[in-house]
Each structure stands twice: as C-alpha cells, then as structure tokens.
Amino acid sequence: MVKYSFLIFLAVMICLSGCKTPESPPVDMRSDNIDVYNGIIAEYLYSQHLPDLKSIESWKNVYGPGLKISTPHYEIYTTFMDRFLLSTIPGFLESAYKVYNSQLPESVISSNKFTIYLFANRTQWEHFTGIFAGEQAEIFYKIKAGAYYHNGACVVYDIGTDRTLSALAHEGWHQFSSRHFKYRLPSWLDEGVAMLFETYSYKNGTIFFEPYKNKYRLESLQKTLVSGKMISLEELTAINPGQVLAIDRAEAVSAFYSQSYALVRFLREYDNGVRRDAYDRILADGYWGKWPLDKVSKEIAIDRNIPRTILWNHIVGNQLFQQYVNEDFEEIELEYIQFCRQIVQ
C-alpha cells in the first residue's frame, strides 16, 4: 500500500491509470565508443564558451554515454546528449537559482551544489527511480510526463526541450527551498511558488520567468472554473499532492495545482499587490524559522527526516494562511475567485 505521508513533489502531468514496473536498462555500448561520444559532446559544449559552464566529465552509468556537467551551483548527471538542451541548461539553471533567491529576504550562497539527473528516456528514468526511490518509487511512476524531487535530487527525463526545462525549474524550487528554508513549506505555498518558474522566455540572451504566461495552469484553472468544482480556500490550503493522488481523480489533481498557482499569484498581484507584503512575510518567516507554530509543528517543520504528515500540512497550511493573509476564508474567497476569472481571460 502506498503511503502518502512522506515529502513528495511532482511536476507537469500526473497519470492516474496505474503504476508500471521499471524495465531493464539498455545494453551498454563499448566503453571506447562511449568515451569517444562523450568527448565529442564535451568538446562541442566547451566550444560554446558558456559563462556558467565550469567543467564536464564522463559519467559512467548502466545506460550508455553520460556526462557530469558542473555549473557554479549545480551538478547535472545526464544521459540525454542533445547539444542544444545541454548548452542551454547551465545558464537556465543558474538563472532559476537567481530568481529563487529573489523570493528570500536575503540572498543565500549554497556551499554544496544541487544534484540533477537528466535521462534520455522514460525507460532509464523508471529504472533509476526504482533503485533511487525504493518503496516510494510507486508514486513517482504515476507521473506521466515530468519530474520529481526526492532525497535532495531532481530527477527528470526528456519530454521536449521546453517542458523539460519547465519541469527542472519547478522541481528546482523544491530543491532550493528544502535546503535553505529553516521551515518546510505547506503544500499550497511550495507548489504555488514552484509554478511561478514553469514559463520563461529569452531576450537578448537573458532568461526571464513569466508566471502570467503559464498556459498549462491557466487552461486547467479555466476548466475547473467552468466545471464548478473549485476547491475552497480552506480546503486548498490544507491538502497536499499525496492526498489528491490518493483519491485517483485527474480533475482533482489539476484543480489543486492550478488553484495553488492562482493563489500565489493572487497574493502577489491582486489589487495592485495589496497582499504582496503578506506573501513576502510568510516566505521570509519560513526562511528564518519565525512562524508562530506549536512545539510539535515546529519540530516537524525543521527536521526534514520527520515525514511531513497529512495532519501537519492540514494544520499548518490553514494556520499560516489565517495568520498572514486573512482569518476569514469566506471573506477572501470571493476576491480570490474574481482574480481566478480575471487571469484566465
């Protein structure tokens, strides 16, 4: 039986049709051929003079050719050898890191690099997940196309350049917040912030993240509004992805993610940012460890080795919203729904 009380983060699309058993990895190529192939890709990347590229090494793995690409803050282990994506990833991840930092009351410096695993296909991803995630792998197999963050690492496979980068940026926030925030964030806040980084654009070689252009989440939000199955704010701030997955309803998963995305945007944007201060304070106090929580809730919030239980998420998610945003859910609900209708236009 799958347990849903552990810390889990999923991105992009969830498949609820059942789990798959990971297939065996492909047969290894000859080691000399792998070395030659790795060398060709590495030489190409070096020739691009990428400012955020620090080093490239061969990564020995059971799947075939692989590289370990290092940037100032990341180590990317990859079997996906597409030249365009690999030349884009160093600058993309470092840009995301800077934007993650902008959510904090002060910039932080990561002494240890973050770990990324990027696989060429789902077969490799599933096989690695079965080993890496152990008994928790079953829940990750439900991801139809996307990525997950687990045990300090982001794990993704190629789903097309734009979507792969989107998934990396989403899971990268979970990775960043888990390391640098003294308190773990409740699901509605952590997922809502992560979705701010799913859409981006390039302008004069610079990457800009544009949450208001997140077509996937906006379309999901619109469907939820039309269906009349909006999750109430009191319920939304109390539940987590594991609970939603447990009820095995795709529309509920879509509603949770799209409404969490809209809620964070609501706090940042509604009425010319009238609640932006509340948003900034709730993140800052989570970063500093200043939330007014009871002793047990504080212990769970601090110690990542203690599972984030459904009950903890329910209590803390509601409590923080009421303390920092509004004690009366019904009072703010109308404004939130109005904002949702506005942004889907």
Image (cartoon, grey):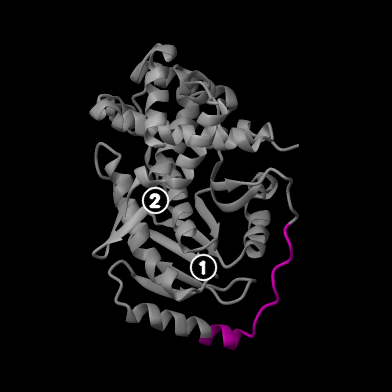
Please state the horizontal and vertical placement of residue 268, each as a whole percent of the image.
30, 32
Look at the picture and state if 85 lies above or below 215: below
The tag on residue 199 is 2
**Is residue 40 among the parts visible in the rendering?**
yes
Dot 1 alpha-carbon crowd within 10 angstroms: few under 14, some 14 to 19, many 20 or more: many
The tag on residue 40 is none
Q: Which residue is drawn at 39% across and 71% down?
A: 87
Q: What residue type is labelled 2?
A: Thr
Predominant SS along the magenta part: loop
Q: Give the range drawn in magenta.
A: 22-36
Q: Is residue 17 left or right of residue 95?
A: right
Q: In this view, does 20 lie to the left or right of 328?
A: right
In this view of the protein, which residue sits in the foreground, 19 or 225?
225
Q: What residue type is labelled 1?
A: Thr
First in residue order: circle 1 vs circle 2: 1
* Helix, strand or loop under label 2: loop
* Helix, strand or loop under label 1: strand
Q: Mark 1 points at which residue?
A: 78
Look at the picture and state if 210 lies above or below 312: below
Q: Is residue 119 left or right of residue 2?
A: left
Q: Quadrant of the C terminus?
A: top left
How many numbered discs? 2
In this view of the protein, which residue sits in the foreground, 193 or 7?
193
**Is residue 306 among the parts visible in the rendering?**
no
Dot 2 alpha-carbon crowd within 10 angstroms: few under 14, some 14 to 19, many 20 or more: many
Q: Which residue is drawn at 54% across and 63% down?
A: 158
Q: Quick check: is 31 in the magenta stretch?
A: yes
Q: Quick check: is 276 in the magenta stretch?
A: no
Please state the horizontal and vertical placement of residue 118, each as a whole percent of the image.
52, 63
Please state the horizontal and vertical placement of residue 151, each as a whole percent of the image.
54, 48
Q: How far apart are marks 1 and 2 (CA)?
A: 23 Å
